[in-house]
Amino acid sequence: SQLVESGGGLVQPGGSLRLSCAASGFTLGGHTINWFRQAPGKEREGLSCISDDGPTTKYADSVKGRFTTSRDNIKNTVYLQINGLKPEDTAVYFCAADWTPFTRFCAVVDDWGRYPIRGQGTQVTVSS
Protein backbone atom coordinates (compact mmCIF):
# COMPACT_ATOMS: atom_id res chain seq x y z
CA SER A 1 0.00 0.00 0.00
CA GLN A 2 1.37 3.37 -0.96
CA LEU A 3 0.44 6.91 -1.83
CA VAL A 4 1.94 8.79 -4.75
CA GLU A 5 1.81 12.56 -4.90
CA SER A 6 2.08 14.46 -8.17
CA GLY A 7 1.30 17.84 -9.67
CA GLY A 8 4.04 19.90 -8.11
CA GLY A 9 6.30 22.21 -10.03
CA LEU A 10 7.63 25.72 -10.44
CA VAL A 11 4.91 28.37 -10.36
CA GLN A 12 4.94 32.14 -10.31
CA PRO A 13 3.46 33.98 -7.33
CA GLY A 14 -0.29 34.22 -7.66
CA GLY A 15 -0.52 31.04 -9.69
CA SER A 16 -2.38 27.83 -8.96
CA LEU A 17 -1.61 24.15 -8.76
CA ARG A 18 -3.63 21.03 -8.23
CA LEU A 19 -1.76 18.32 -6.39
CA SER A 20 -2.88 14.71 -6.59
CA CYS A 21 -2.49 11.92 -4.07
CA ALA A 22 -3.13 8.57 -5.72
CA ALA A 23 -3.51 5.35 -3.78
CA SER A 24 -1.80 2.22 -5.01
CA GLY A 25 -2.46 -1.22 -3.60
CA PHE A 26 -5.46 -0.19 -1.55
CA THR A 27 -8.66 1.82 -1.88
CA LEU A 28 -8.94 5.30 -0.43
CA GLY A 29 -12.52 4.67 0.55
CA GLY A 30 -12.66 4.27 4.32
CA HIS A 31 -9.59 6.44 4.87
CA THR A 32 -9.06 9.95 6.13
CA ILE A 33 -6.46 11.76 4.06
CA ASN A 34 -4.30 14.56 5.40
CA TRP A 35 -1.99 16.88 3.50
CA PHE A 36 1.26 18.18 4.95
CA ARG A 37 4.18 20.24 3.73
CA GLN A 38 7.73 20.75 4.79
CA ALA A 39 9.73 23.79 3.81
CA PRO A 40 13.53 23.82 3.91
CA GLY A 41 14.74 24.15 7.48
CA LYS A 42 11.25 23.98 8.94
CA GLU A 43 9.13 21.38 10.69
CA ARG A 44 6.48 19.47 8.79
CA GLU A 45 3.20 21.37 8.87
CA GLY A 46 -0.31 19.94 8.70
CA LEU A 47 -2.44 21.64 6.05
CA SER A 48 -5.76 19.92 5.62
CA CYS A 49 -7.81 16.81 6.15
CA ILE A 50 -10.73 15.14 4.41
CA SER A 51 -12.79 12.50 6.12
CA ASP A 52 -14.13 9.28 4.69
CA ASP A 53 -17.80 10.05 5.20
CA GLY A 54 -19.46 13.35 4.26
CA PRO A 55 -16.81 14.20 3.52
CA THR A 56 -15.74 16.78 6.08
CA THR A 57 -12.80 19.03 5.22
CA LYS A 58 -10.71 21.17 7.53
CA TYR A 59 -7.77 23.50 6.97
CA ALA A 60 -4.94 25.05 8.88
CA ASP A 61 -5.48 28.76 9.50
CA SER A 62 -2.37 29.50 7.46
CA VAL A 63 -3.94 28.14 4.26
CA LYS A 64 -7.66 28.58 4.82
CA GLY A 65 -9.32 30.26 1.86
CA ARG A 66 -6.56 29.36 -0.59
CA PHE A 67 -6.33 25.57 -0.28
CA THR A 68 -9.14 23.14 -1.08
CA THR A 69 -9.00 19.40 -0.67
CA SER A 70 -11.35 16.97 -2.37
CA ARG A 71 -11.56 13.28 -3.07
CA ASP A 72 -12.64 11.04 -5.89
CA ASN A 73 -12.96 7.52 -4.54
CA ILE A 74 -13.68 6.13 -8.00
CA LYS A 75 -10.33 7.45 -9.23
CA ASN A 76 -8.79 6.48 -5.91
CA THR A 77 -7.30 9.95 -5.65
CA VAL A 78 -7.39 12.91 -3.31
CA TYR A 79 -6.60 16.41 -4.52
CA LEU A 80 -5.24 19.62 -3.05
CA GLN A 81 -6.10 22.71 -5.05
CA ILE A 82 -3.80 25.61 -4.20
CA ASN A 83 -4.65 29.11 -5.37
CA GLY A 84 -2.88 32.41 -4.89
CA LEU A 85 0.50 30.75 -4.44
CA LYS A 86 3.06 32.68 -2.40
CA PRO A 87 6.82 32.20 -2.14
CA GLU A 88 6.30 30.97 1.42
CA ASP A 89 4.28 28.07 0.02
CA THR A 90 7.51 26.63 -1.37
CA ALA A 91 7.85 23.20 0.19
CA VAL A 92 7.57 19.48 -0.38
CA TYR A 93 3.93 18.49 -0.12
CA PHE A 94 2.91 15.11 1.26
CA CYS A 95 -0.29 13.17 1.75
CA ALA A 96 -1.00 10.51 4.34
CA ALA A 97 -3.85 8.10 4.98
CA ASP A 98 -5.44 6.57 8.06
CA TRP A 99 -8.11 3.89 8.15
CA THR A 100 -11.25 5.57 9.58
CA PRO A 101 -14.32 4.05 7.91
CA PHE A 102 -17.70 5.76 8.23
CA THR A 103 -16.08 8.67 10.08
CA ARG A 104 -17.19 12.23 9.43
CA PHE A 105 -14.63 13.76 11.75
CA CYS A 106 -11.09 14.70 10.76
CA ALA A 107 -8.43 16.95 12.22
CA VAL A 108 -5.50 18.90 10.85
CA VAL A 109 -2.44 17.71 12.71
CA ASP A 110 1.30 18.20 12.42
CA ASP A 111 2.09 14.70 13.65
CA TRP A 112 2.97 12.93 10.41
CA GLY A 113 4.12 9.80 12.19
CA ARG A 114 0.66 8.72 13.30
CA TYR A 115 -0.38 7.90 9.74
CA PRO A 116 0.36 4.37 8.60
CA ILE A 117 0.38 5.15 4.89
CA ARG A 118 2.46 8.09 3.68
CA GLY A 119 3.63 9.39 0.34
CA GLN A 120 7.06 10.51 -0.82
CA GLY A 121 6.05 14.06 -1.59
CA THR A 122 5.97 16.44 -4.53
CA GLN A 123 7.99 19.65 -4.71
CA VAL A 124 6.23 22.97 -5.08
CA THR A 125 8.39 26.00 -5.80
CA VAL A 126 6.89 29.45 -5.99
CA SER A 127 9.20 31.97 -7.57
CA SER A 128 9.24 34.67 -10.19
Image (cartoon, rainbow, N blue to C red):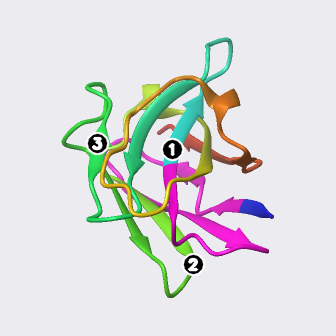
Query: In the rendered structure, which disc, 3 or 1, sits on the residue that comes first in sequence?
Result: 1
Q: Kindly identify which numbered label has been placed on residue 35.
A: 1
Q: Circle 1: is it few (<14), some (14-19), or many (20+) Cα within 10 Å?
A: many
Q: Circle 3: is it few (<14), some (14-19), or many (20+) Cα within 10 Å?
A: some
Q: Say which residue appears at 72% left-offset and 62% top-offset.
A: 4
Q: Is residue 69 left or right of residue 122?
A: left
Q: Quadrant of residue 64?
A: top left
Residue 84 spot, x, y in % from top left = 28, 45
Residue 121 spot, x, y in % from top left = 70, 47
Q: Are marks 3 and 1 in contact (CB under 8 Å)?
A: no
Segment colored magenta: 4-33
Question: What's the amino acid at mark 1?
Answer: Trp
For the residues labelled 3 and 1, the Cα–Cα distance comes to 11 Å
Provide the secondary structure element on which disc 3 rests: strand
Query: In the rendered structure, which disc, 1 or 2, sits on the residue that comes first in sequence?
Result: 1
Look at the picture and state if 49 lies above or below 68. Answer: above
Q: Which residue is mark 2?
A: 76
Q: Which residue is mark 3?
A: 58
